[in-house]
Image (cartoon, helix red, strand yellow):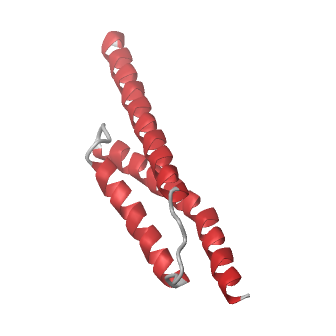
């Protein structure tokens, strides 16, 4: 019996690590995407940029939805963590975009 419990625990840990690795990859790729952006003139509005960022977060979340592993609850938790980390990356990007918009009106 202990053998089966241990095997189940080891499987859970392997799935958890696989999802962590996927989240890490997704965050790195998303960060590259943000760093590649060049702000152009004429700009889009701040509201439109928020929509673009939301769309990107949704795109990445939906892409990685196909790759996370484990039971439904584990997959949902991993996707929630991914979404949270991607949204966190959006905040400084949006701050840079706001500064860009201000520089145009100065």
Side of 26 where 66 appears, left or right: left
Quadrant (top left/top right/bottom left/bottom right) for the N terminus: top left
x%, y% of residue 49?
49, 76
Q: Give x and y (percent) for residue 62.
A: 30, 56
**Is 12 displayed left or right of 32 in the figure?**
left
Q: Quadrant of residue 102?
A: bottom right
Q: Which residue is more in the foreground, 46 or 60?
A: 46
Which residue is rendered at x = 44% and y = 34% of the image? Answer: 21
Q: Is residue 72 above or below residue 39?
A: above
Q: Position of residue 30 (x, y in %)?
A: 47, 52
Q: Residue at x 64, y 63 (%)?
A: 92
Instruction: Single out the residue that lies furthest toward the right.
Output: 106
As drawn, the residue found furthest toward the front would be 41
Residue placed farthest to the bottom in the image? 105
The one of 67 and 40 positioned closer to us in this rendering = 40
Query: In the rendered view of the protein, which quadrant contains the C terminus?
Result: bottom right
Count of numbered circles on the image: 0
Q: Residue furthest left?
A: 66
* Residue located at (39% from left, 51% from top): 79
User: Where 97 sits versus 35, above or below?
Assistant: below
- x%, y% of residue 38? 53, 66
């Amino acid at each position: 019996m202990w053998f089966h419990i241990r095997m189940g625990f080891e499987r859970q840990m392997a799935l958890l690590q696989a999802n962590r690795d996927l989240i890490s990859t997704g965050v790195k790729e998303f960060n590259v995407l943000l760093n590649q952006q060049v702000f152009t003139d004429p700009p889009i509005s701040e509201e439109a940029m928020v929509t673009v960022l939301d769309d990107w977060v949704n795109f990445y979340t939906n892409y990685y939805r196909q790759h996370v592993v484990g039971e439904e609850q584990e997959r949902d938790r991993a996707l929630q963590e991914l979404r949270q980390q991607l949204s966190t990356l959006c905040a400084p990007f949006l701050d840079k975009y706001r500064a860009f918009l201000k520089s145009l009106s100065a």
